[in-house]
Amino acid sequence: MTIQNIIEVSAIESRIKEIALKVLDSKRITPEEGVMLYRDAETSLLALLADQVRKRKVGEYVFYNRNVHIEPTNICVYDCKFCSYSHHQSKESWELTVDEMAKTVVNLGDDITEVHIVGAVHPGRDIYYYADLVKRVHEARPGLHIKAYTAIEIEYMAQRSGLSFEQGLQLLKDSGLNSLPGGGAEIFDDKIREQICGKKSSTEAWLQIHETAHKLGIPTNATILYGHVEQFEHRIHHIELLRNLQDRTGGFNAYIPLKFKNKNNEMSYIEEVSVIEDLRNYAVSRIYLDNFAHIKAYWPMIGKEMAALSLAFGVDDLDGTINDSTKIYSLAGAGDQNPSLNTDEIRQLIIKAGRIPAERDSVYNILREG
């Protein structure tokens, strides 16, 4: 190693130390500092810093809920290259009726507290169809929290019905909608979006729909799709836009990094990123999003054991029981092909990680501790 190399390494180490001290002092880091953490920080340091941020936010709690997914259809107007779920890639297609979905809700166990309704963007269904679905679900189980429809779905259904985003969201809220999931964000760079999901909503539309929802009193989640063609700078830009929106509205409940999976899609030639990169991504996300209360590891995507490991890298939420009710990631080659955990299994997973299980409702009120 040359003297110049030694000086450069020393300078990087000094800069990383400065960033670490900022984090420990609860000071916000810049986009440039976020990129530097991705590129140059030791994994062990990222884990320690993310863990400190987590403790400040939630103490030793790890959250979960009792939920079930309903996926109305996989027939989609879009043909995103990373998608393994839509009828463009899957060998099967389906479109459930409102009666079928309402019956599913009626037959749920009394312990389920949330229904998560997300599917493809069906070309023949408008917002009135989906508002009726929400209404029927609400009437069947008035106490059930309805988290439904990504910004991508809402943009299409509202425009197809001639409504503004605000009008569409208000209609859904009046029908019984309680919150929005965070899907469809993918990556907030329109050049990359053009490459991997060119027909889908723009960055601006996704952010506008979530900001409108927050102003209407509808809380939402946020996601990212990482590990494909993006660079660290793109990830940081993505969460910088989310952090800025959260500064304005405070309406996000949780941030959920979603890993690109390369089975059964047009991007199968891209190698998936490593487990270490997954953990580093959780940690940087926790450090950077200083105004988000929760970072979620979606265990049906990464698997139970990986989800448990993520708890050491800033994660404090493992989602819920799911009850084998989602195909979105199993079709893409996810860690759990039959995604279902009961509450005792989730609790034991959390306890083995040295944390306190906290069963929550959909807006993070604790229903059961320990």
Image: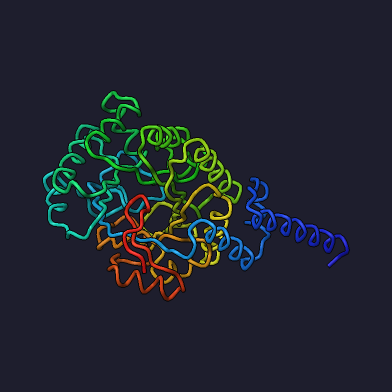
As drawn, is 150 to the left or to the right of 71?
Answer: right
Q: In percent of the image, x 41 and y 73: which residue is there? A: 351
As drawn, the residue found furthest toward the top would be: 162
Total labels drawn: 0
As drawn, is 46 to the left or to the right of 19?
Answer: left
Residue 71 image position (x, y, % from top left): 25, 50
As drawn, the residue found furthest toward the right would be: 3
The quadrant of the image that shows the C terminus is bottom left
Q: In percent of the image, x 47 and y 55: which residue is there? A: 295
**Is residue 256 visible to the viewer in this orientation of the structure?**
yes
Q: Who is closer to the viewer here, 175 or 71?
A: 175
Residue 221 sits above or below residue 128 on the image: below
Residue 278 sits above or below residue 223 on the image: below
Residue 191 image position (x, y, % from top left): 53, 38
Q: Who is closer to the viewer here, 53 or 309?
A: 53
The quadrant of the image that shows the N terminus is bottom right
**Is residue 199 visible to the viewer in this orientation of the structure?**
no
Q: In percent of the image, x 29 and y 57: which residue is there? A: 327
Display coloring: rainbow
Q: Who is closer to the viewer here, 273 or 173?
A: 173
Residue 88 image position (x, y, % from top left): 30, 47
As drawn, the residue found furthest toward the bottom would be: 352
Residue 264 image position (x, y, % from top left): 36, 57
